[in-house]
Amino acid sequence: CRHLAFTDCGYWTTWLGELCHWTVFRCLAYALFLSFHLSQGTRDYNPKQMAIREKVFNTIISCFKRHGAENIDTPVFELKETLTGKYGEDSKLIYDLKDQGGELLSLRYDLTVPFARYLAMNKVTNIKRYHIAKVYRRDNPAMTRGRYREFYQCDFDIAGQYDPMIPDAECLKIVHEILSELELGDFRIKVNDRRILDGMFAVCGVPDDKFRTICSTVDKLDKMSWEDVRSEMVKEKGLSEEAADQIGQYVSLQGGMDLAERLLQDAKMSQSKQACAGLTDMKQLFSYLQLFQVTDKVVFDLSLARGLDYYTGVIYEAILTQTGPEGVSVGSVAGGGRYDGLVGMFDPKGRKVPCVGVSIGIERVFSIMEQKAEASAEKVRTTETQVMVASAQKNLLEERLRLTAELWNAGIKAEVMYKKNPKLLSQLQHCEDSGIPLVAIIGEQELKDGVVKLRTVHSREEIDVSRAELVEEIKRRTSDV
């Protein structure tokens, strides 16, 4: 300050003005940054990422259609009362919308509850459906593991009164097909049954009113050690140490049909009618899975709980057996089960429609596919353009547009550069960069002769093709692209 007092005032006034101007600019820039960053747990997708996603979606939809599923859609938000009480301890993750002085609404948490509401409202008692749409959860995001607050689910469900375990086995077959076709790596499908779990809790001494909360704790075994799970059951949930230790003996068991047979002979489990019914169905399920030739990837795992309240029978979850980069696990990539009582919650007369289904965790699948593409430096095409219409000479814009329109009208995926006189090198470079396989080149001589010079981009070979035969020649050359 002493220095400023004895210095030329005009200079320092200018300097201070510039300093204030720069400070204001920085504040504005920071404010703009705050205004334009994404909401937590969401993301944008560039064309390359969308191309990978589209490939994944097409694989999944193709499988659903192969199994005879029909497509439906439901609103992105539901009445709050529709979603309340369906998700157990996960209900706290539901996004409630601000009250506008009318209906209390929430964003859908999954696609299963809206599907059950749809069945009840429309009195549908028999359908095999698929539904691919966004859902919303106030979860703690883990972007590298494919865990978001806004994400897609790909659901397949069978509703109707059928003989036990046949639809359930088909759902597991679908999971096996999709994960095999996507080539994500080795995977395992864990199966259990809520009746077996409830029977296990009963014979281990868990009070009836603690079944759901203990089930939610057991569901954490894929993220926590048994010691931590046991501690939560005893210290936080008030379960006796003896009951917790007995549960620990059962949830460590894994196997196949042989395990179901062994548990049917178990001194404690055989005392529970619920458990015996679930174990009998588990044996039947594995017999169908053998016919579908998928038992190599399926394991009966008593630690599988799936905390959602609406499950009533078989439950399952698919996980990848290898970890991702830096040893990070991506968690489950598919899950589902039987929910025979959910539709009845929405029917005025309580009429039930037996349902079983599966949901593919598309974001986690995409995260793995994206990492694989980056690791392999794979070039991903972001367009499906088959041919670029180009010219080597000036003043041929109208002819290029005319030819492009002819190709579009014939169902050919074509592009043209939006310049009157583009350089041929620029047009060819665009094809190289975009992966466009063919270039249709026209010039004064080609127009006189009624031909088009068709160039194969990767080999640079060129042939003259008559204008009348151009469409068929392009189709022939791109039939396997």
Image (cartoon, grey):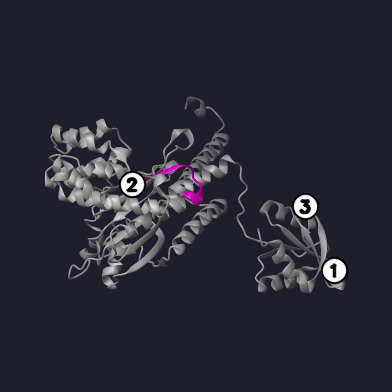
Of pointers 3 and 2, the one earlier in the residue sequence:
2
Q: Which residue is mark 3?
A: 459
Question: Which residue is drawn at the image coordinates 79% and 57% (left, top)?
Answer: 424
Q: Amino acid at mark 3?
A: Ser
Give SS at disc 1.
Answer: helix
Of pointers 1 and 3, the one earlier in the residue sequence:
1
Q: Which residue is mark 2?
A: 139
Question: Which residue is drawn at the image coordinates 49% and 61% (left, top)?
Answer: 62
Give the Cα distance between marks 1 and 2.
62 Å
Pinpoint residue 230: horizontal percent, then vertical percent.
Answer: 22, 33
Q: Can you tell which mark lies on residue 350? A: none
User: Label 2 crowding class (10 Å Cα cut-off): few <14, some 14-19, many 20+?
Assistant: some
Q: Which residue is mark 1?
A: 446
In the image, which residues are magenta?
180-191
The picture quadrant where one finds residue 236 is top left
The reply to whether the C-beta atoms of the residues labelled 1 and 3 are less than 8 Å apart is no
Pinpoint residue 257: horizontal percent, then vertical percent.
Answer: 31, 45
Question: Compared to 201, does 231 lie above or below?
Answer: above
Give SS at disc 3.
Answer: loop
Give the Cα distance between marks 1 and 3.
21 Å
Q: Amino acid at mark 1?
A: Glu
User: Label 3 crowding class (10 Å Cα cut-off): few <14, some 14-19, many 20+?
Assistant: few
Pinpoint residue 55: horizontal percent, then vertical percent.
Answer: 53, 55
Whether residue 189 appears in magenta in the rendering, the answer is yes
Depth check, mark 1 against mark 2: the one in front is: 1
Q: Amino acid at mark 2?
A: Asp
